[in-house]
C-alpha cells in the first residue's frame, strides 16, 4: 500500500505534507483521517483509519492482566492522535510526538506497507547506516523462520 522513501520538511506551522504517491493511495481508499502515534526505534507511525482499527483490534486482544500488555497499550494509545489532512495533503504533527521522535524540521517519510513512518532526518540516516549491512542476514533469518 505505502512504499518508498521521501525527504520533506515541516512548514512554519509545523505541518507535514504527505508525499503525493501516498495521497493517491489514500484517495483510492476514500480516507482523509490518519492516526499518528509513537512508533518503535524512535520514529512515528502513521496509519489510515482502516489500518488503525486493525491495529486496535489486535492490541485489544492482549490480556490486560499481563503487565507488559498494559504498559504497551498505555504508551501506544496514549500517544495516538487523530489527524485530518487539509486540501494540500498536509497534517499537523502534535508537539509531544515531535519531541518523542526528535523532529525539528527535516524528516524522512517511509512507506512500510500498511503504515507510514516519519523519522527525524538525522535519526533515519543513523538507523539506516547502522542496519543496512544486516539486511540480507535479517532477510535470511526471518524468511527461514516463517517457512518453518
Image (cartoon, helix red, strand yellow):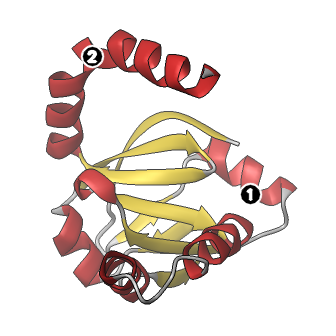
The C terminus sits in image quarter: top right
The earlier-in-sequence mark between 1 and 2 is 1
Q: Quadrant of residue 70?
A: bottom left
Label 2: which secondary element: helix
Residue 76 visible in the shown view:
yes
Above or below 143: residue 37: below
Q: Nearer the viewer, residue 50 or 16?
A: 50
Q: Which residue is mark 2?
A: 134
Instruction: Indicate left or right for 36 with 27 as reference.
Output: left
Image quadrant for the N terminus?
top right
Depth check: give the residue in front, 8 or 28.
28
Counting from the top left corner in percent of width and height, residue 98 is at: 24, 71
Query: Label 1 belongs to which residue?
Result: 26
Residue 77 vs residue 69, the one in the foreground: 69
**Residue at figure coordinates x 68%, y 64% from the top left:** 51
Say few, some or many: other residues with alpha carbon within 10 Å of mark 2 (under 14 / 14 to 19 / 20 or more): few
Q: Which residue is painted at 47% across and 24% down in the image?
A: 142
Q: Along the line of sight, which residue is nearer the eye, 118 or 40? A: 40
Determine which quarter of the picture holds residue 31: bottom right
Compared to residue 91, the image places residue 110 above or below, namely: above
Q: Residue 117 at what x, y percent from top left? A: 43, 52
Query: Vertical placement of 81 versus 21: above or below?
Result: below
138 above or below 105?
Answer: above
Q: Is residue 85 visible?
A: no
Residue 12 image point, x, y percent: 28, 71
> Residue at horizontal 32%, vertical 75%?
68
Of labels 1 and 2, the one closer to you: 2
Amino acid at each position: 500500500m505505502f512504499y518508498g522513501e521521501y525527504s520533506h520538511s515541516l512548514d512554519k506551522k509545523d505541518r507535514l505534507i504527505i508525499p503525493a504517491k501516498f495521497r493517491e493511495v489514500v484517495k483510492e481508499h476514500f480516507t482523509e483521517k490518519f492516526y499518528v502515534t509513537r512508533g518503535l526505534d524512535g520514529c512515528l507511525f502513521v496509519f489510515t483509519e482502516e489500518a488503525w482499527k486493525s491495529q486496535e483490534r489486535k492490541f485489544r486482544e492482549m490480556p490486560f492482566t499481563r503487565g507488559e500488555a498494559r504498559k504497551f497499550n498505555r504508551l501506544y494509545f496514549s500517544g495516538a492522535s487523530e489527524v485530518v489532512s487539509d486540501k494540500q495533503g498536509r497534517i499537523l504533527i502534535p508537539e509531544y510526538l515531535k519531541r518523542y521522535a526528535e523532529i525539528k524540521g527535516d524528516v524522512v517519510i517511509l512507506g512500510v506497507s500498511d503504515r507510514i513512518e516519519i523519522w527525524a532526518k538525522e535519526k533515519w540516516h543513523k538507523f539506516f547506516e547502522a542496519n543496512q549491512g544486516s539486511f540480507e542476514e535479517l532477510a535470511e533469518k526471518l524468511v527461514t523462520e516463517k517457512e518453518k
